[in-house]
Image (tube, grey):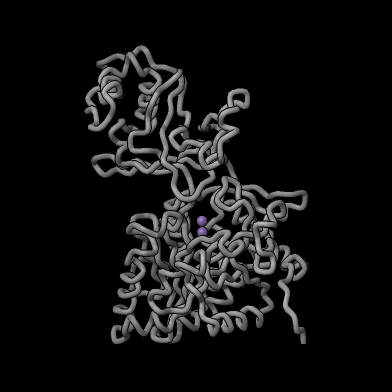
Amino acid sequence: MMLSHTSRNCWEIYSGQKDEKAMSALAKGYIEFLSLCKTERETVDYAEKRLRAAGFSPDCKTDRVMRVLHGKSMCVVRRGNAPLKQGLRLICAHADTPRLDLKQHPLQEQAGVGQAKTHYYGGIRKYQWFARALALHGVVVKQDGTVISVVLGENMRDPVFTIADLLPHLAQGQAEQSVAKAFDPEKLNIILGHKPLFDVDKKKNRTAKAFELGKPVAGKAPEQDAERGDTREKTPIKTHILSLLQQQYDIIEEDLYSAELQAVPAGAARFVGLDAALIGGYGQDDRICVFAALEAFLSDVENRPSHTQYLIFWDKEEIGSEGSTGAKSRFFEYCLQEIIAAWESDTRFSDVVLASKALSADVHAAVDPDWQELHEKLNAATIGHGPCFCKFTGHRGKYEANDAHPEYIAWLRSVLNSKGIPWQMAELGKVDGGGGGTVAMHLAAYGMNVIDCGPPILSMHSPFEIASKADLYATMLAYKAFLQA
Ligand code: MN
Ligand code: MN
C-alpha cells in the first residue's frame, strides 16, 4: 500500500493506443466546438442542437428534457431508475467568457478612423486585447422583434477588427505607469472602418435617412450632439459603417441599442506544441467544462442511468452570477420543480436537492512554468495531471467559499479511483495571494453536496487559453464516472 500520495500524469496513464485514439478524437471535436462557440448564446445553441439530436425536448412528460432561458443558459435532465428523492447527479458549468462588449452607443469617428467603443465583460488583462485580430459575435434585435445573428471576422473571406496599440516610440510615459493604470478602458476602441462615404443620395440611401432621423441622446456633450445632427458632413466614416451595416443586416443605428455585440479573438482554436499535446484557444474557461460535461452526458445516452442526471449551463459567472441567466437566478429551481411535478408529484423539492450530488465544473489555474512563485506548489494544480478538485474557492480566510464536506470528497475519491481516473486537489494561489469565485456556492445554498472540479488551464482569462488534451480526456471520463455513480 502506498502511504504517500502524489498526483499522476495522465499521459502515462493514457499511453495505450485505444486511449490515445479516443483522446485525439475528443480533442478534435473540442477544437471544432471551441472555434464555433465564442459566446454563451452560441454555446447554448450548440448544446441544444446536439441534445435535440439525442432526443431531448422541452416536454417534461418525457424522460429527456431540456430547457433554455433567453438563449443564454440551459437545464438538461435525463431520468434515472432511482426515484428523485434519492437525488440528482448534477454538473453545472458556465458558458460566458471574458470579452469586450460593444457599448450601447458604440460608433464614433476620430482621426480618420471609425471605431466602436467597448465596455469589458469579466476579468480581462486589458493589454492583451490590443493589436490582435478580433471578431464580432452577437445579436441585434430590431424593433419588430427580428433577431439578427452576427458573426463577423471568423471566415477567411471576412475582414477582422482590431484595437490599435501605442507604438513604443510614444509609450515612454505609459511604460512608467503601473499595469493597472497604463491601460485606460476608454481606449479599448475597436477599429470598424476607415473609408468615408461622401456621396449620400438623400432619396435613395435609406441609411443616411434613417440616421438623420435618429434623435440626439440626452447626456451627451453638446459637440457630440451637433455631430449627430449633421453626420454626413462631419462623420463620413461612421456614415459609411452605418451604410454597410444597413446593407448587410438591414439595421440602423438605433438598432444597436437593442444589441449584444461581443468582440472576441478572431480565428480557430489550435493544437499547441510540436507534439500537439496542448489546445490553445479563446474561452476555455469554462467551455472546456461545458464540452466535457456534454460529451460525458451524451456518451451513454441509450441506457437509463441509475440516478437522474442534470446539467446546467449558466451565463454571467464571470460577472458574479447575477442576472436572470446567472447562477443566482431561480431558473434551475423552476426547471426542477417542473420535473418533479411531471415525474413524481408527491416528492418534495427539498428532499431532491438535499440528496443531490453536484460538481461545479469549472477550470482551475495550472502552475505557470514562469510564475511558479505565485503558487503554493504543494497545493497547486499541474497541467496534464487530470481534473482538479478545489475544496474551497473564495479568498482571504476562505471568505465567500463553498467548503466541500469531507464525506463528499471521500465518496468522489472512491468513484474516480475505482475507475482508475487521475485527479488532483488544489487551491488557487498562495493564501492571501489570490482567489476567485465559482457557482458552487449557489448550488450549496440548496444544501446539496457540491465541489469544484475541472481541468487546470494556463493563461486563464486570456485571448488564448491553454489546456492539455490529456486533461480534457480525463475530465470527460471523470464527469462520466460521476454521472453514472
Ligand atoms: Mn470559470
Ligand atoms: Mn473565469
- The reply to whether residue 435 is in sight is yes
Above or below residue 133? Residue 72 is below
- The reply to whether residue 206 is in sight is no
Residue occupying image coordinates x 39% and y 55%: 72
Quadrant into which the C terminus falls = bottom right
Residue 332 figure quarter: bottom left
Residue situated in front as seen by the camera: 400 or 65: 400
Above or below residue 119? Residue 361 is below
Count of number-bearing discs? 0
Quadrant into which the N terminus falls = bottom right
Question: In x, y percent, where is residue 81?
Answer: 45, 85
Residue occupying image coordinates x 51% and y 47%: 124
Above or below residue 199? Residue 448 is below
Question: In x, y percent, where is residue 46?
Answer: 47, 55
Question: In x, y percent, where is residue 328?
Answer: 36, 64
Residue occupying image coordinates x 68% and y 53%: 371
Residue 343 figure quarter: bottom left
Q: Is residue 420 left or right of residue 337?
A: right
Residue situated in front as seen by the camera: 306 or 375: 375
Q: Is residue 125 left or right of residue 221?
A: right
Question: In x, y percent, where is residue 163?
Answer: 51, 32
Above or below residue 3? Residue 370 is above
Residue 471 figure quarter: bottom right
Residue occupying image coordinates x 29% and y 87%: 346
Residue situated in front as seen by the camera: 470 or 107: 107
